[in-house]
Image (tube, rainbow, N blue to C red):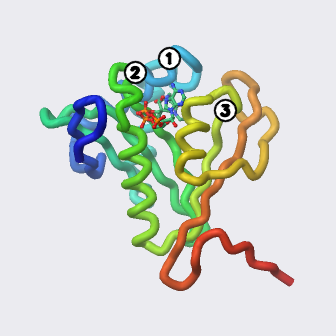
Amino acid sequence: MSIPGEISVSIVDLSSLGVPGRQQAAEILVAAFRSGWPDAWPGMAEGLEEVDEALGAERISRAAVDEHGRVLGWIGGIPSYRGRAWELHPLAVHPEFRRRGVARALLAAMLDGARRRGVELIFLEVRPTNAEAIGLYGSFGFQVIGRRKGYYFDTGEDALVMEAKLATADSPAVVDKQVG
Ligand SMILES: CC(C)(COP(=O)(O)OP(=O)(O)OC[C@H]1O[C@@H](n2cnc3c(N)ncnc32)[C@H](O)[C@@H]1OP(=O)(O)O)[C@@H](O)C(=O)NCCC(=O)NCCS
């Protein structure tokens, strides 16, 4: 895929990149959050722990790699409700490759994969101060549907809960069903 800013990226399964991919994904996580939220993943130990969770059997993780196979960013998905809903976590793009469509390519690939598997709902938590991420999610149709008080252990910040409904073969998107 060719994206503005002259970077050509491919979206691949993070697990296909083996040990080097695991290492780079952890480095990106640490680097991506360092300037804004340094205690989220303060070092490689915490980064690797998160990557290993993301590589777990039930999880989905995709990486954006350049033509040299270098990881520029990655995204994780956590299926819940018997796979009918996915939580997106985490999403990180290396600071040197920002604003060139890498996150957009990752999110688009994740949503395509979710649609193909019949996922109906995608949700995530985001910090209210994270204007970049909120802008990104908003451009994909995510809406704020709630707030978790004091959710982030590192800063005590609330989390905004955002969700997007996906169209499936059986049910068109954005139909709120009345229950009861
Ligand atoms: C949020 C993040 C993943 C975006 O990655 P990115 O590759 O730079 O994003 P993209 O280039 O694909 O941008 C897609 C859209 O996101 C929004 N966006 C990204 N950076 C932005 C910025 N600095 N200011 C405002 N909006 C921004 C815009 O809507 C942008 O679309 P546009 O370029 O057409 O205006 C990246 O900044 C990051 O890793 N941040 C730290 C980790 C993080 O916040 N993760 C998400 C936690 S919920």
Disc 2 target residue: 95
Q: Secondary structure at mark 2?
A: helix
* Disc 2 residue lies near ligand 1 with CB under 8 A: yes
**Residue 37 higher or lower than 180, as above or below:** above
**Of callouts 1 and 2, the N-terminal one:** 1
* Mark-to-mark CA distance, 1 and 3: 15 Å
User: How many numbered marks are there?
Assistant: 3
Disc 1 target residue: 34
Disc 3 target residue: 127
* Mark-to-mark CA distance, 2 and 3: 18 Å
83 horizontally vs 73: left or right: right
Residue found 68% across the figure and 26% down from its top: 129
The three-letter code of the residue at mark 2 reads Pro
The three-letter code of the residue at mark 1 reads Arg
Do the numbered discs 1 and 2 sit on residues whose CB atoms are within 8 Å?
Answer: yes
Q: Position of residue 127 (x, y in %)?
A: 67, 32
Residue found 45% across the figure and 64% down from its top: 114
* Disc 3 residue lies near ligand 1 with CB under 8 A: yes
Q: Position of residue 118 (x, y in %)?
A: 48, 74
128 horizontally vs 131: left or right: right
